[in-house]
Amino acid sequence: MMENENFLNELDKMLEKEREKACPECLKCGWCCKHTVCYYGEWDYERNQCKFLTNENLCGKYDEINKIEEEMNLEIKLFGSGCCLNYSNPDRLKKYSKNG
């Protein structure tokens, strides 16, 4: 039984490392909110981006969304998962090279 638990713990660690590689840290470049909206967003047709995206590329509904998801006790949340749109993302690449 202990051997199975050790195996599962090691497997969890391995999977967590792979998840980190798959979705690196968000650099707040705004790319995702300039191409589509999340479940909580609304499209601004004049600006061609989510209407809640601020000039600093932050989510204007961040606190509200976190509160909702906290109350729902969600395991996977909108924020904190990292950037899964990191390939061929010119905004991210520019910001990454500036942050060096």
Image (spheres, rainbow, N blue to C red):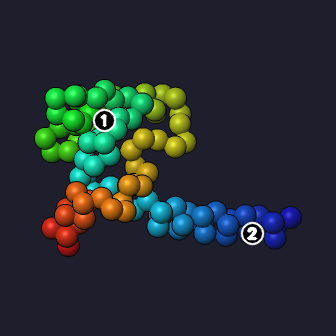
Q: Which mark is residue 62?
A: 1
Compare residues 32 and 71 and report the one nearer the observer: 32
**Where does the image place residue 28, in percent across and percent down from the top left?**
25, 51
> Residue at left 52%, top 61%?
19
Question: Does residue 2 appear left or right of residue 15 in this picture?
Answer: right
Q: Which mark is residue 7?
A: 2
The crowding category of the residue bearing disc 1, from other C-alpha atoms within 10 Å (few below 14, some 14 to 19, many at least 20), is: some
- Disc 1 and disc 2: Cα gap in Å? 37 Å
Mark 1 element type: helix
Three-letter amino acid code of the residue under disc 1: Tyr
> Residue at left 31%, top 42%?
35
Quarter of the C terminus within the rendering: bottom left
Compare residues 77 and 84 and report the one nearer the observer: 84
Three-letter amino acid code of the residue under disc 2: Phe
> Residue at left 54%, top 66%?
18
> Residue at left 42%, top 41%?
78
Answer above or below: position of 48 versus 16.
above
